[in-house]
Image (cartoon, grey):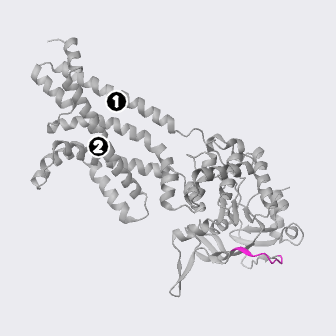
Amino acid sequence: MGFSFSIFIDFVTSPLVVRAAGVTIWVAVVAQAIGTVLGTGLGVMMTSKKRSLTWPAQFYLWLFKGTPLLAQILFFYSALPQLGLTLSLVATGLLALGLNEAARMGDIVRAGLMAVPDEQREAAASLGLKPWITFRKVIFPQALRTILPPLGNNFSYMIKATSLLATISFAELLRVSQQLAQSTTHALEAYCAASVWYLLLITIWTIIQRRLEKKIAIKGRENGSVATSAVRQLPDDFKATVILPASDAPVIIDARNVSKDFGGHTALHPTDLIVRRGEVVVVLGPSGSGKSTLLRTLNWIEPADQGDIRIEGESLPWETRGGRRVRRGEASINRTRQRIGMVFQHFGLFKTYTARENVALGLIKLKKMKRAEALEKADSLLAQVGLAGQAHAFPVELSGGQRQRVAIARALSMDPIALLFDEPTSALDPETVNEVLDVMAALAGQGVTMVIVTHEVGFARRIADRLVFMEAGHKVMDMPVAQAFSEEAPQRFQAFLRHIGP
């Protein structure tokens, strides 16, 4: 018996087949939704630092990824009734497909979350955003761009996986096609009709998937550079040169005996640093000297191993309870962090938000401003840094200098008592460096308190009140800028200046 095209068309358009195709897509959608929701939870658990969360998630993935889907379907259909739990065909199908899909989605979500750079979390923390807000507004929207393509592929697989439910006589597309083949003896036409419907459903979804991916895609790449320099060791009899100018200005930041180790390597030896209101303190030194580590301890983005940071006399990491000094909770630290703005080397802009939305986020979530008011203030701050015409641009549409100016505007949005700059120009092209330096110089002229880690010696000479020089994790010098660039400066700093040239 040959192939009958007319019978084939009759099967394709048969109300039974059309209805079965509808059932197939409905089951696939619901099962995918179950798997996506549960898998998202599993993915978040696996990125946790708590073993009580990671281990159950890992066991779940091991179990459901390590056994065949067909075996899982038959277990829910045949074994559960023996344990006293009988499910309907619909519940059996949705449960088996959804739980199996959750295991695959767990891996996908975990990979998506891990793909988001740590700088995004640090930028959110520097604003004082709560972890849940950071996850919902910063991390997950970016992770979604990594998650969506494999999620779309998984849904294509899910449409086809529904065919396995034919083994338990579930009336989806393949089962109905089997019944037609058996009742009419036209098996070839029946299965070809089923194949056409599967291909049609997959094709429609592929088109939708590509449009979704295109809509939320982040275009372009961000480039950055990292300066390198040899780290020299200091002699055992080393003693820092510290000359602090007389001043009645109140102390804004008071770092006391802070130190930090990384994997047995001491990045920062016990160090003190005082910053008064209106001061511009510039920290210089070769790469690896501990400059950035010191700066990052000042707002506890990098928790010190020992020591204390006081912000206007209030300890940032510690509080007294029952006569004992104990570590403050993250929520409490975040509230204090809001008073200290930070600008990162690689900008740390939230990629899914426009320039004005980046600036407005902290105002909305922390200062509880109405969105319209927050956006208006964001526009004003962007104009202040020379970006009035770029308010609606996304970070990838901006130059490096423009992105860094947005980052400065975002830091200013919280009305900080001081600003921290972590090598703000080292990731910029030479032609864009001055854009950022000019904005920083203008802020210095306005009396903004700043601590700046930089390699720009000329800039330091121009705007700094005090200059701190670091080497091998030690503070070698802390002097007024005029004395720092004189013969009074320590020989090691003078040697550093000769090494880097004019």
Question: Start and end of the magenta stretch?
Answer: 245-253
The residue at the point 80 percent across, 52 percent down is 438
The residue at the point 68 percent across, 54 percent down is 409
Q: Is residue 343 visible?
A: no
What is the x, y in percent for residue 392?
Answer: 63, 42
**How far apart are the alpha carbons under marks 1 and 2?**
16 Å
What is the x, y in percent for residue 304?
Answer: 59, 72
Compare residues 341 and 76 and report the one nearer the observer: 341
| The quarter of the displayed image where residue 264 is located | bottom right
Q: Is residue 439 left or right of residue 259?
A: right
Seen in the picture, residue 74 relative to 273 is either above or below; the reply is above
The amino acid on which the numbered mark 2 sits, given as a three-letter code, is Ala
Q: Locate the N terminus by quadrant.
A: top left
Q: Is residue 246 magenta?
A: yes
Using a 10 Å C-alpha cutoff, classify the residue at mark 1 as few (fewer than 14 neighbours), some (14 to 19) or many (20 or more): some
- Which residue does the numbered mark 2 point to in the structure image? 31
Determine the secondary structure under disc 1: helix
Compare residues 119 and 391 and report the one nearer the observer: 391
The residue at the point 55 percent across, 40 percent down is 218
Q: Nearer the viewer, mark 1 or mark 2?
A: 2
Circle on res. 202 = 1
Q: Main secondary structure of the magenta part?
A: loop
Circle on res. 352 = none
Determine the secondary structure under disc 2: helix
The residue at the point 52 percent across, 68 percent down is 331
The amino acid on which the numbered mark 1 sits, given as a three-letter code, is Ile
Q: Is residue 41 magenta?
A: no
Seen in the picture, residue 443 relative to 469 is either above or below; the reply is above
First in sequence: mark 1 vs mark 2:
2
What is the x, y in percent for residue 357?
Answer: 60, 49
